[in-house]
Amino acid sequence: MKVVIDEDKCVGAGQCVMAAAEVFDQRDEDGIVVLLDAAPPESRRAPVEDAAVRCPALAIEVLP
Amino acid sequence: MTGNQPTTSTRHTPGTQPMGRTCPFSPPEGYRTLREEDPITPVTFPDGAKGWVVSRYADVRTVLADPRFGANRRRVRPGDAPDAPLAPPPPGMFIMMDGPEHTRFRRLLTGQFTVRRMQKLAPAVEQIVADQLEAMAGAEGPVDLLQAFALPIPSLVICELLGVPYEDRAEFQENSSMVLRLEASRDEVMQAQSAMNEYIHQLAVAKRAHPTDDILSGLVQSEQLTDEELAGVGSLLLLAGHETTANMIALGTMCLLENPEQLAALRSDPALMDGAVEELLRYLTIIQYGLRRVALEDVELDGHRIEAGATVLASLSSGNRDATQFPDSPDALDIHRPYRTHLAFGHGVHQCIGQQLARVEMKAALSALFDRFPTLRLAVPADQVPMRDDMLIYGVHELPVTW
């Protein structure tokens, strides 16, 4: 599984951190998403996909 | 709730017979019919604007995430033709801005509201909650939970975040309440709004001279905003963080008291609190009429042609009861419900910036309240609690409780 984020789209709502804190974090200065793990293990697929769905700005893409 | 429904349809129930609530915790029944039979409904709004109401979960998300729908819906005069120019948003009022202008403001603030920062704030919030409960415990007879508990909490928290002195909070509550009151005259609203702006303006000037560790000082030091913009942003945050959370705490308490089996489950397993907060947010959806957007160009939406200039009302409360998204009895409060993304904080680039703070506050308030007063109950029959049918933000006007 590969995760791709679009920093320009991110609006810093923090939904991804709520869904999968092992994979997503936020920059302190501006709250923009930080990808902690661009290729998370398959076991984390559910929360990562949840993060993508929750993202209000549709800034997260999950690739197979 | 007659007369205050913002939508009147040309061919549906809302037009001929304004939709009212039949359950204090649920949106008007008519929305169910709309969702099932005519989910993209043509309407004429009270200000004469022609437009649409979308009531299905998926359509609400689509509209709110699509940049072809703008957040500034202010024509110069009410009733102006759709191609009349939009008035520019007041300085700093970024919830009414689109595109790069919106992003510029939003990015100045998002760092202040990250999940991590809000979780760090939890102990301070818990202390504020404990102090309010202690004061409440000393009262004799029934107390109004809204005034004694639910309002002071977000008030104190947002004042702390912004660096607003506690002694000024009464004035803030008065002004913010006025701005949101539907029956207030335009003059009253403008006056309250400008009093608030003026106050924040003065506070910002003071912060410039003596910066402290708060959001307003941070914004002043960024040197990216004019004083006018600072005042606008500051009063927007105060307004947005005030009555919303207060009403979620008060209405959420009432809702749990009216669903005793759910409350009992929650009390027996505090780990259910996170899910309970999400479910209360979904179930109650206090932004009761939804969010308005304006089509910036012609948009095709599920077979309907939304013309440029048309207003679209995205009904958050209706979307949050959509069985397609919440398949298991969407009209029931179920704190065990598996998390599915709800619309209580909106969606799209304007989604609530303070949502993590709201979660921290609700969690702290509800946990401590039911711990401190295990026998808490309404002091009047539920149908005598005055509901805020008349306000943009739903909730209770007061909540008499005893224990």
Image (tube, rainbow, N blue to C red):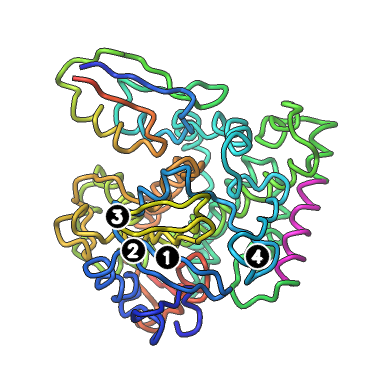
Of residues B290 and B207, the one nearer the viewer is B290
**How far is the residue under mark 4 from the one under mark 3?**
36 Å
**How far is the residue under mark 1 from the one under mark 3?**
13 Å
**How far is the residue under mark 1 from the one under mark 4?**
25 Å
Left or right: residue B326 compared with residue B401:
left
Report in which chain the residue with disc 4 lies.
Answer: B
Left or right: residue B85 compared with residue B403:
right
Local secondary structure at mark 4: helix
Report in which chain the residue with disc 3 lies.
Answer: B
Tally of marks: 4
**How far is the residue under mark 4 from the one under mark 2?**
30 Å
Local secondary structure at mark 2: strand
**Same chain, marks 3 and 2?**
yes
Specify the label residue B302 is tagged with. 3
Which residue is rendered at x = 41% and y = 82% of the image? Answer: B15
Residue at the spot of label 4:
B179
**How far is the residue under mark 2 from the one under mark 1?**
6 Å
- Mark 1 neighbour class, 10 Å CA radius: few under 14, some 14 to 19, many 20 or more: many
- Mark 2 neighbour class, 10 Å CA radius: few under 14, some 14 to 19, many 20 or more: many
Q: Amino acid at mark 1?
A: Trp
Q: Earlier in the sequence, mark 1 or mark 4?
A: 1
Report in which chain the residue with disc 1 lies.
Answer: B
Q: Earlier in the sequence, mark 1 or mark 3?
A: 1
Local secondary structure at mark 1: strand
For discs 4 and 2, the disc positioned in front in the rendered view: 2
| Discs 2, 1 touching: Cβ within 8 Å | yes
Q: Amino acid at mark 3?
A: Asp
| Discs 3, 2 touching: Cβ within 8 Å | yes
Which residue is rendered at x = 65% and y = 35% of the image? Answer: B215
